[in-house]
Image (cartoon, grey):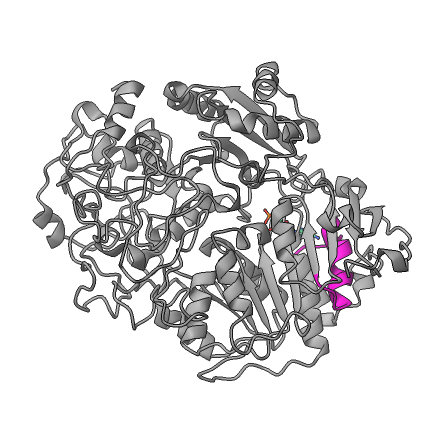
Amino acid sequence: MGDEDWEAEIITPHLSSYVPVFEKDRYSSGANGDTFSRTPVPSPEIDDGPSRRDHFMRSGFASGRSLGNRDAGESNKRESAPTMGGFGVGKGFGNRGFPNNKLEEGDSSGFWRESNNFGEDTSAQSRGFSRRGGFQDGNDSEASAPPRRGGRGGFRGCRGGFGLGSPNSECEQDEGTPRTAGLFGSRRPAFSGPGHGDIFQSRSGSGRGGYKGLNEEVVTGSGKNSWKSGTEGAESDDIQGPKVTYVPPAPPEDEDAIFAHYQTGINFDKYDSILVEVSGHDVPPAILTFEEANLCQTLNNNIAKAGYTKLTPVQKYSIPIILAGRDMMACAQTGSGKTAAFLLPILAHMMRDGITASRFRELQEPECIIVAPTRELINQIYLEARKFSFGTCVRAVVIYGGTQFGHSVRQIIQGCNVLCATPGRLMDVISKEKIGLRQVRYLVLDEADRMLDMGFGPEMKKLISCPGMPSKEQRQTLMFSATFPEEIQRMAGEFLKLNYLFVAVGQVGGACTDVQQTVLQVGQYSKREKLVETLRSTGDERTMVFVETKKKADFIATFLCQEKISTTSIHGDREQREREQALGDFRCGKCPVLVATSVAARGLDIENVQHVINFDLPSTIAEYVHRIGRTGRCGNTGRAVSFFDPESDRPLAQPLVKVLSDAQQDVPPWLEEIAFSTYVPGFSGSSRENVFMSVDTRKNFHGKSTLGTAGFSSPQVPNPADDESWD
Ligand SMILES: Nc1ncnc2c1ncn2[C@@H]1O[C@H](COP(=O)(O)OP(=O)(O)OP(=O)(O)O)[C@@H](O)[C@H]1O
């Protein structure tokens, strides 16, 4: 089937009746001890073959067997089917078969409404039966509950087939309001034809309300109570909808695992020459060494065990600012150590203030709340918090969507000083009175621009107006990201004290200069061929391939497996267990290629990712910066290759040229030409996405800044009375 046929397949609706079935996979060990093949297996006769790759290949796709028209009942008799890395998570194979060894993508367009790329829907419970087949997790204590709201019955893989014709079907997006492209809008239509697979419909009259932002954590609301409503219903008991039963495995407890880290790269020392600008008044001087931070011995030990010997620029500036009790917004390039920049001073404060050890209690009152937009990222932050608080009485806890609510509660009630949470789950535990906010002294928004955009912004506003939440004067609010569009900076003021400091490390919104960026002009029908060619030329390098939609992620992952490239996928339609398995397989190198939607664009810190491929370019330049930042981290070098399709990517040409040239990368003449032809006077990113503000937005008015390199703190700028109006 040629590319054009493939596209035709995408836009042609098919009724799905094929249900993939699964078999135990002796190669992979599941998180909960149960092991499953991550591929749909057409029949028990197909052998596993000698290698994992072969296994992938033989599992249905390379076998030459038609998988179509499989009886759903057969699937039902089989074992649970929780994982299927890289393949269509049950949404594309219905009623089709795979003649000629070729995969056809059948997304059942028109039935299952795929979100656009900026609308990753990850709320498992919000999807009803479309996501949750008739299996039970090994740890599923609740799975036998009767189906609710459309039921959990049915079968994995039937996503496409259900929901037809019913506007209230669970197969429709379970959201009260249309998703948006976040603050910035999108160059792609919010509602588009099925060819892009990014249409969605809001449920009208479902009463759950909610919204969906860029790429994570659907938040739904029951509308019962203005501050509670945001997520109630997402995973609470009092709402309709299938329960999420996944209990993530506990992370390893041994010290070696806790402190495992990768090496800083050859460019780590070059960080010292990056220009840093701090704006605001009374800027505490930067520190040059960990010793200057005067942290307690246990923290210093943990820093040493983590392999940190030298501060990164954002740490040099942020640590003293946070230790001085100031609010701040910090913008520093991807992979430059922002997580430790906020964790270390917060933990130091907690230790200094003599925090009381957590005790078992039904209602916990953490001193610190950290929120991040994706489940995998918040988990990563939690692991960092656990590492740095090792051997102290500070207890960090992580809770996130897609996991059993009871599990989150069990984690919390054992004690909680630092709560790491995704917004939906956080609001849920607050509304269930498992978390009280009275003791909150530190509120951290990681990926803050994302946390404040139209996707999560309303939820964050609810959080700060929850009963008990100390006012901004009484708490310390910290925001971190590699991108800070101007409009978001303005909005952030609501959360921060007036005298907050803005730390800009290098170019705000700029790409990491350790990533070698290449942009290739590739039309959509040539992309797959180019992808295979690129991957073959890079051998076994760990590569993240970003695509625009969830269904395309599955499709491309399957396609690559067909091409004998061991691949898995991560996106918001996958069960949380599958997502974690996919990430684990990628991290350990079992699957060196990870196809992902924007859900994996931010924050993920994975060792040895040498290569990022933008199979589809994102709709915003900020997203581009975050995506390519999955490589070239912590002084290591990396490469990013982007397929620019002039048909659809023109609006990105101008900001792309700017990002490339700011990072001293070659700008292809054809790209410059396109950028020139789409020239917008006064451009600085896009009219609504000015990620290139080189300074604190307040500075345009009255702010003062302190400029220095990461190696030296410049003298403080005096605080003239006539410049006081902003603080
Ligand atoms: N001072 C340091 N010395 C050595 N390694 C460090 C130091 N600070 C951070 N790291 C390591 O660098 C890596 C990247 O850090 P981190 O994930 O905090 O980056 P980030 O700036 O938050 O990136 P992103 O913008 O993508 O979220 C991590 O593996 C972290 O452990």
Query: Quadrant of residue 255 in the image?
Result: bottom right
Residue 238 placement: quadrant = bottom left
Residue at screen point 41% across, 35% down? 548
Picture mark count = 0
Placement of 625 over or under 527, stated as above or below: below
The residue drawn where x is 77% and y is 41% is 274
Is 58 magenta? The answer is: no
Q: Is residue 226 above or below residue 69?
A: below
Residue at figure coordinates x 27%, y 51% from the top left: 36
Q: Is residue 484 visible?
A: no
Horizontal side of 11 relative to 440 (left or right) equals: left
Asked whether, in this view, residue 684 is left or right of residue 183, the answer is right
Q: Quadrant of residue 630?
A: top right
Q: Is residue 653 visible to us here?
A: yes
Q: Is residue 320 magenta?
A: yes
User: Residue 546: horizontal and vertical position, in percent?
Assistant: 45, 36
| On screen, residue 294 above or below 99 | below
Front-most of residues 370 and 448 = 448
Instruction: Give the position of the C terminus as an image quadrant.
Output: bottom right
Q: Which region of the structure is painted magenta?
A: 304-327
| Quadrant in the picture for the N terminus | top left
Q: Say which residue appears at 20% left-offset and 41% top-offset.
A: 41
| 138 on left or right of 44 | right
Residue 54 x/y as whole percent: 29, 33
Can you give x and y, in whole percent of width and height, for residue 217 in the image? 42, 55
Percent position (x, y) of residue 706? 84, 50
